[in-house]
Image (cartoon, rainbow, N blue to C red):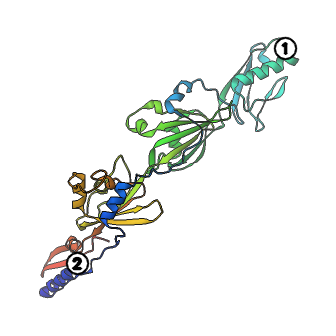
Amino acid sequence: MIHKAILHSLLLLLLLPACARQQLQPTVSFEDFQQEAGAAPIQSTRKFVPSGTFASARASVGNDIVTDYIIGAGDLVAITVFESDELNTETRVSSRGDVAMPLLGRVHVEGLTAGEAEKKIEEALVKDYMHTAHVSLFIKERMNQHVTLVGAVKQPGTFETQSRKRLLEVLALAGGLAPTAGDTAYVTRRDRNSGNNKVFLVDLDALLTQGRMEMNMMIQGGDVIFVTESDMIQVDGAVRRPGAFKIDGKMTIDSAIASAGGLAAYADEQDIKLIRKTKEGKREIVQISMEDIIAMRENRNTSIRNGPWKELLLRDGDVIFVEASGIRSFYSGVGFSIGFMGTGINYSNPVK
């Protein structure tokens, strides 16, 4: 029985390399790919950018405290008339944007700042009831702070907050950044006087990794926050941790494989595929070996035009696929078990 098991295992060992086949067939030679990549400029990924006048998030710092709040429906306001305590009142702004006051009845204040509402009430009192009036309006609760978050956040949508918050607090309302989030956020704010959009650029990398708190700008009601998507590549096949990864800086094929945990034990180092979508929308597949990759990285391959490893710089949407070696897959799947009757051999396919 032991001899038969060993014989079956040896037969399997001989058959597996013959059965091994490429899962992806190359569509372009490595030489042609070298020339195309070396001659063609890297196309920048077209990302959505909000329209408006652009400014850095640091430009908003001076306005963080003094920016006037716009009164809206549901706000709780306290109105004080210094000349007459009987006219003092605390009330909510109605759904129609009015506040109810003694003598004046309903006064429309929606869309006004606190200072503008004070002036409006003063003028109404002086017109019909008083020689002079000094009014103070304090907003005790803010109910119309609607902030919209879109792009690479976990839960995009419009959120309501009763108090002013900074960018990181508002991002937390949407569950935080998505794994695909890029390094830039755009905060679009409509200028009340001109009606034009002002777009603040926030460097999320500087904020989150360098602690640059001037980027943690104050968010106002009506702001729209758009978090960009990062350029992404996919690493699959015979690697330890297949998945999608951000392109950080100048990422090359070998660094992408390293991000995926390195080659698996059963990987075929002579059969690594780079799959790239051309500007015409066609996908090209080129086969390359790890030896070639290392040689280019170390600048030992002088036949590549326009830089020794320019074509190895990955672009948004690239896919790296590492083929499995039949013989290595077999050895990786062979296990030994020692039982009462002797030594047995079992096999499990590591590629699955």
Q: Residue at x 66, y 37 (%)?
A: 144
Q: Residues within 10 Å of mark 1 (few under 14, many from 20)?
A: few
Residue 138: percent from the left, percent from the top? 67, 24
Residue at the right extreme of this rendering: 128
On the question of residue 70 being in view, the answer is yes
**Residue positioned most to the top:** 131
76 horizontally vs 21: left or right = right
Q: Quadrant of residue 88?
A: top right
Q: Residue at x 41, y 39 (%)?
A: 205
Q: Find disc 2 in the rendering and name its residue.
A: 17
Residue that mark 1 sits on: 130
Give the secondary structure at mark 1. Answer: loop
Residue nearest the observer in this picture, 25 or 27 = 27
The quadrant holding residue 253 is bottom left
Is residue 273 among the parts visible in the rendering?
Answer: no
Judging from the image, what secondary structure is the residue with disc 2 in?
A: helix
Image check: 336 left or right of 287? Answer: left
Quadrant position of the N terminus in the picture: bottom left
Mark nearer the viewer, 2 or 1: 2
Q: Is residue 264 above or below residue 112?
A: below
Q: Nearer the viewer, residue 78 or 39?
A: 39
Position of the C terminus, as image quadrant, is bottom left
- Say whether residue 298 is left or right of residue 249: left
